[in-house]
């Protein structure tokens, strides 16, 4: 039976402290280098945000505050910006920079903004949670795809006439 390790780290973002919780099957740390590695069904939560991956590496500064988080392998996520915009998606790699409040998603990114169902697919998508900005790039000269859901309120059903 695999042991489940529960680790709580504290992360100061802006003026408020939010608890960064990591749940995984395995954990290794190198405190002098400021590196913690979690593997096996990793679940990371911070406030309303949740990130799931096969492996998560958290880098900390000399005060043991997280400065960077890298998630790899079948990454799925749910994030909420300061403007209360909600995003859900998946990718193969994600990087979170807590000091900038920026998420970067890489490789086979599929990001859905739940508020208006705008979907972005590409190989690099960046979401700034402070400003609510998102940008996307592609790799190998493939296009970035954005899908809008449009509700036509002026359409009427046409009756059948004979």
Image (spheres, rainbow, N blue to C red):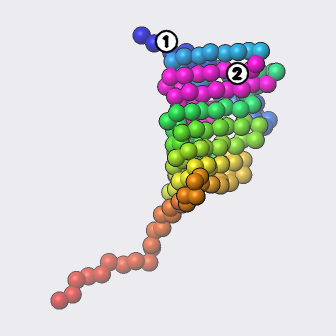
Q: Quadrant of residue 157?
A: bottom left
Question: Residue at point 62% right, 50% down?
Answer: 125
Q: Quadrant of residue 106?
A: top right
**Disc assigned to residue 32:** none
**Spot occupied by residue 8 in the image (x, y as percentages of width and height):** 64, 20
Residue 144 seen in the current view: no
Q: Which residue is mark 2?
A: 35
Which residue sits at x=45%, y=73%? 153
Q: Quadrant of the C terminus?
A: bottom left
Q: Residue at x 59, y 16 (%)?
A: 27
Assign the N terminus to one quadrant of the image. top left
* Front residue (pair 62, 13): 62
Name the residue beneath numbered marker 1.
3
Q: Residue furthest bottom?
A: 162
Depth-wise, is mark 1 or mark 2 nearer the camera? 2
Q: Position of residue 64 (x, y in %)?
A: 77, 21
Answer with mark 1 or mark 2, whichever residue precedes in sequence.
Answer: 1
Q: Magenta segment range?
A: 33-61
Q: Is residue 108 above or below residue 43?
A: below
Q: Quadrant of residue 57?
A: top right
Residue 46 coordinates in the image, percent (x, y) = 63, 32
Q: Residues within 10 Å of mark 1 (few under 14, many from 20)?
A: few
Q: Nearer the viewer, residue 99 or 71?
A: 71
Does the residue at mark 1 contact the one at mark 2 (Cβ under 8 Å)? Answer: no
Residue 56 is inside the magenta segment: yes
- Element carrying mark 1: loop
Q: Residue at x 55, y 22 (%)?
A: 39
In space, the residues marked 1 and 2 are separated at their CA atoms by 21 Å
Q: Is residue 130 above or below residue 67?
A: below
Residue 36, above or below 138:
above
138 and 85: which is toward the camera: 138
Q: Residue 120: image x %, image y %? A: 54, 55
């Amino acid at each position: 039976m695999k042991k489940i390790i529960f680790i709580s780290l504290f992360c100061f973002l802006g003026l408020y402290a939010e608890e960064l919780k990591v749940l995984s099957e395995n954990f290794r740390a190198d405190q002098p280098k400021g590196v913690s590695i979690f593997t096996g069904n990793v679940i990371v939560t911070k406030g309303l945000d949740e990130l799931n991956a096969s492996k998560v590496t958290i880098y900390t500064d000399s005060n043991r505050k997280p400065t960077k988080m890298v998630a790899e392998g079948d990454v799925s996520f749910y994030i909420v910006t300061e403007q209360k915009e909600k995003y859900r998606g998946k990718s193969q790699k994600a990087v979170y920079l807590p000091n900038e409040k920026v998420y970067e998603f890489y490789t086979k990114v599929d990001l859905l903004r739940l508020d208006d169902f705008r979907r972005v697919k590409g190989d690099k998508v960046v979401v700034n949670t402070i400003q609510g900005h998102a940008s996307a790039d592609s790799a190998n000269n493939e296009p970035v795809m954005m899908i809008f859901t449009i509700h036509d309120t002026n359409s009427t059903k046409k009756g059948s006439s004979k």
